[in-house]
Amino acid sequence: MIEISNLTVKFGGVTPLDGVSVRFEPGTCGLIGPNGAGKTTFFNVLSGFVRPVSGSISVFGEDLLSMAHYRRARWGLRRTFQTEQAIEELTVADNVAMVLEHAPGAPRGGARREAVLDALDFVGLDADPDCPVGTLGARERRLVEVARAVVGKPRLVLLDEPAAGLPDEETEHLGRVIARIPQETGALAILVDHDMSLVSACCSVTAVLDFGKIIAAGPTAEVLRDEQVIKAYLGTEEVAA
């Protein structure tokens, strides 16, 4: 479980997170909101890239803010970014294996290779593990990013718009993968995405940020019907559809 209390971030005169308090239970959880709502800043705080001016974050009973950012990676925090992080010149397997360098008790030798192949199998990537990432299409590269987030034994997986630009069929596949992350890895996953069909398909609960504040949180279907959420973000026609 993640429990955030009174989390506030200020950049000069801008307050991208303003007293955010929210709880994410184990499972796959959604975090949505319009552009500029504070979602990426929220992920940056969890990742250790941004230091809040106030507030607390407890993850499975541990004080996340007391950990240096590099220790969070070793502890088990994984993240995808809107911009792909895989190195095009390296092979698929090497890109995934790089993440294990920061994992506690990282496997070596044959066990390391097995862990990488297990992650690639989990995301459904059928490309040659020994081919360079730069030779892959958009779908395959996105799956490599998710494989990097789930390899080994993650405890918290942050997914920042992993399906952006993908067609519906490929988004549906990715949704099935994301929904299985807690069951298959034991990690708590938080998904940020603008695709409400993806959020609905794989997130049992969802929180909504607007102007740096949580305006709704709870079961995803109920949140998406909330009048304040519709007004702030979704639009009546989209929800009705």
Image: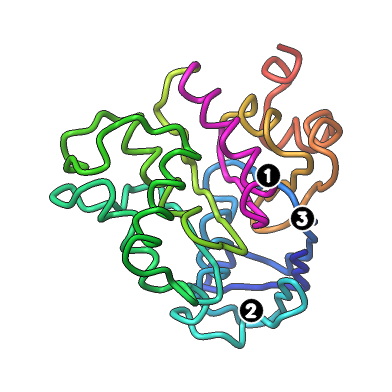
Across and down, in percent, residue 177 comes to 56, 35
User: Looking at the image, is 54 positioned above or below residue 38?
Assistant: below
- Bounds of the magenta span? 169-194
Instruction: Tell me if residue 49 can be seen.
Output: no
* Left or right: 143, with 92 as reference point: right
Picture disc at residue 30: 1
Pointer 1 or 2: first along the chain: 1
Please state which of the two labelled residues, at mark 3 or mark 1, is closer to the viewer: 3
Q: Position of residue 35 (x, y in %)?
A: 53, 43
Image point 40% across, 61% down: which residue? 111
Residue 213 is inside the magenta segment: no
- Give the SS element for disc 2: helix
> Callout 3: helix, strand or loop?
loop
Q: Disc 2 designates what residue? A: 64
Q: Is residue 228 above or below residue 116?
A: above
Q: Quadrant of the C terminus?
A: top right
Characterize the local packing of mark 2: few (<14), some (14-19) or many (20 or more) Cα atoms within 10 angstroms.
many
Q: CA distance from mark 3 to mark 1?
A: 12 Å
Outermost left residue: 89
The answer to whether 234 is drawn above or below residue 142 in the figure is above
Q: Amino acid at mark 1?
A: Gly
Mark 3 Cα within 10 Å, few/some/many (few <14, many 20+)?
Answer: some
53 with respect to 220 (left or right): left
Residue 174 highlighted magenta (yes or no)? yes
User: In the rendered image, which residue does mark 3 sit on?
Assistant: 26
Mark 2–mark 3 Cα distance, whole angstroms, equals: 16 Å
Looking at the image, residue 230 sits to the left or right of residue 85; the answer is right
Amino acid type assigned to the residue bearing label 2 in the image: Leu
